[in-house]
Amino acid sequence: MPIDKEEVKRRLLQRERELSDEIATFNEDARDSRPSDVEDPIDEVISSQAKAGSFAVSNMASETLLQVRAALQRLEQGDYGICVDCGRPIEEARLNAVPWTPYCRDDQEKHDREREQPGAFESAL
């Protein structure tokens, strides 16, 4: 079945708005969470851990937002639904589940394995 480009675009734009709102909220929360003068060491650790967790979630949202915007660009260019690595069509079920995915299942698994390997990042440098 051919891709309903208008429906895909609607879903991607909706996700883009949601992610932008999430990121703005995370950034606002991070700015508002200043340490108080009476914070004891335990409170300071808890506060630091909470900030680190918020930044991690914000980074994931930012990464997904970049992927959503790249998918919108592929949609406009006419190569949406084609794996950016191998050039094969991305499975319809995969596009329905994650409409911003740039990879077919096989290439996504390859990228996931590369990320899981210890030292993979350092060897890429």
Image: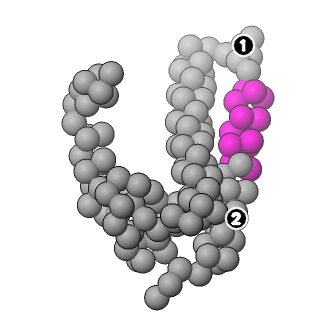
Check disc 1: other Cα within 10 Å, few if <14, some if 14-19, many if 20+: few
Residue tagged 2 = 14
Closest to the observer, 44 or 86: 86
* Residue found 73% across the figure and 43% down from its top: 25
Q: Name, please, the residue furthest toward the bottom.
A: 1
Give the quarter of the image for residue 16: bottom right
The alpha-carbon separation of the residues under discs 1 and 2 comes to 42 Å
Q: Position of residue 14 (x, y in %)?
A: 70, 64
Q: Amino acid at mark 1?
A: Val
* Residue found 45% across the figure and 57% down from its top: 102
| Magenta-drawn stretch contains 30 | yes
Which colour scheme appears in the figure? Answer: one colour
For label 2, the SS is helix
Seen in the picture, residue 106 relative to 70 is either above or below; the reply is below
Q: Position of residue 56 (x, y in %)?
A: 52, 36
Mark yes or no: residue 107 visible: yes
Residue tagged 1 = 38
| Magenta-drawn stretch contains 97 | no
For label 1, the SS is loop
Mark yes or no: residue 46 visible: no
Closest to the observer, 108 or 23: 108
Relative side of 109 to 26, left or right? left
Relative side of 61 to 25, left or right? left
Check disc 2: other Cα within 10 Å, few if <14, some if 14-19, many if 20+: few
Give the quarter of the image for residue 6: bottom right
**Disc marking residue 73:** none
* Residue found 74% across the figure and 42% down from its top: 24
Q: Taken as a whole, is the magenta stretch helix, strand or loop?
A: helix
> Magenta segment range?
21-33
Q: Position of residue 60 (x, y in %)?
A: 53, 43
